[in-house]
Amino acid sequence: MGVNLNVHTRKQKLRCGSSSKLAMLSLMLGVALLLQHGVGAVEFTFDLADNAEDCFYEQIKRNTSAYFEFQVSAGGQLDVDVVLKNPEGQVIYKLDRATFDSHQFVAETTGVYSACFSNQFSTFSHKIVYVDFQVGEEPALPGVDEHATVLTQMETSSQAIHKGLNDILDAQTHHRLRESQGRKRADELNQRVMVWSSLETAAIVFIGLAQILVLRNFFTDRKPSQAHYGRL
Amino acid sequence: MHKQLIWLSLLLCTLHSACGLYFHISETERKCFIEEVPDETTVIVNYKVELYDPRSNGFMPSSPGIGMHVEVRDSDDKVILSRVYSSQGRISFTSHTPGEHVICMFSNSTAWFSGAQLRVHLDIQVGEHAIDYANVAQKEKLTELQLRIRQLLDQVEQITKEQNYQRYREERFRHTSESTNSRVLWWSLAQTVVLLCMGFWQMRHLKSFFEAKKLV
């Protein structure tokens, strides 16, 4: 990756050779990019308040592939508005009221890409959103993936196993979130059944008593003089 | 030119930090992240806070005055960690109970600064992602292949932990569903009884009422 960047800087230098300012800028940019560790994969879950919008930003280099995934695991109808924007502020990916999706893209320009989650359509339910944002390839194991010689069969298969295990971990994460969706729904249902049944029991007793009182009123109203002397 | 250089050096400093992702919060705001982890799993959080600088219209790369209060709670809402760190920090904790761990961050700002924006760079690594293999290779003097096998072993271990945790959660899920089921069953029985009693009492009451009124 470092080699590619150097070439890129050199090309830029050639192109704007006359302007030393630009050359210096591009050189500094090249240095800055080299200093950066380059790759970042971060996954986290956050609480999106009702009526709120939360944005996350990430610096992505040109021609780096990035993978973005989100999943709403609790709250309301499990939906959220998602917008991905490039450094120029153009929308590169947009989804309204979505529960789960992933998007892979290649950065066309170096700069800060933003991912915004909006819950502005929902006035009272807050959401729990899982985000997985991977930029670039997974960092190589020191000394393992770097050497130039042809890989032995052992190395190739160990690499394949590593990739497979990564897939398993991803699938597990996905299922864990699905399970937590289901579990939270079930907890909610349990709670609701409890509250509803207590309310309905109260309602039955109340209606029963009210019926009697109303009926008694019907028959006592006709003879108001007797009402106070009735046995009941 | 000068301005651009300042901007670039700022960019350079920003880029140099290990964390790629960042977000903005106001100084008095509290931001929480949830990590659902199996037990005995290490979680590493790296963060760096930058204060908004109105003069350069950017963010100061280092803000010595700003500290971050970090609080970690486990699934039973018990505080595992609650401490004030400086503007840059690395927190690591190991979960002892499986479940949702909530990591909350808020600045220790005083009223003097309130309202200013903070930029927080954040990186959260869980389980085998948190292992620094360069370090491991150096310390244990492993060959390339040994290191790879080591990584595979860590991954398999992580998968096993996750599966054990899944089993535990499935048990809880089933428990909840069974509870709902029994509540619905018992309540429908109780409701029938209540309805019958109510109807019986109403009839008896009305009958004696009408008899007293000499309507029947």
Image: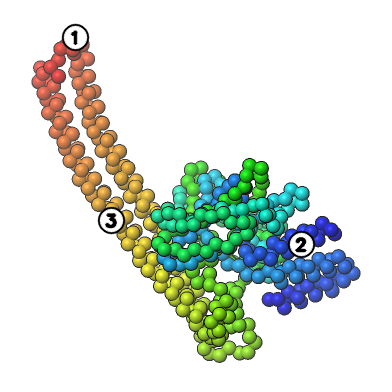
Total number of numbered labels? 3
Question: Closest to the observer: B58 or B207?
Answer: B58
Instruction: Choose mark 3 or mark 1, whichever is in front.
Output: 3
Which amino acid lies under the numbered mark 2 shown in the image of this protein? Ser
- Whether A231 is drawn above or below B106: the answer is above
Q: Position of residue A155 (x, y in %)?
A: 54, 86
Instruction: Choose mark 3 or mark 2, whichever is in front.
Output: 2
Determine which residue is flagged by label 1. A225
Label 1 resides on the chain identified as A
Badges 3 and 2, same chain: yes
Q: Residue at x 55, y 80 (%)?
A: B139
Q: CA distance from mark 2 to mark 1?
A: 97 Å
Q: Residue at x 48, y 60 (%)?
A: B35
Residue extending furthest toward the top: A225
Determine which residue is flagged by label 2. B9
Q: Which image quadrant for residue B208?
A: top left
Q: Quadrant of the C terminus of chain B?
A: top left
Question: Closest to the observer: B124 or B181?
Answer: B124
Q: Secondary structure at mark 2?
A: helix
Q: CA distance from mark 3 to mark 1?
A: 58 Å
Q: Residue at x 63, y 42 (%)?
A: B111
Q: Is residue B94 left or right of residue B55?
A: left
Q: Residue at x 14, y 26 (%)?
A: B205
Determine which residue is flagged by label 3. B178
- Whether A213 is drawn above or below B38: the answer is above
Question: Closest to the observer: A202 or B214?
Answer: A202
Does residue A136 appear anywhere in the picture? yes
Label 3 resides on the chain identified as B
Q: Secondary structure at mark 1?
A: helix
Which amino acid lies under the numbered mark 3 shown in the image of this protein? Glu
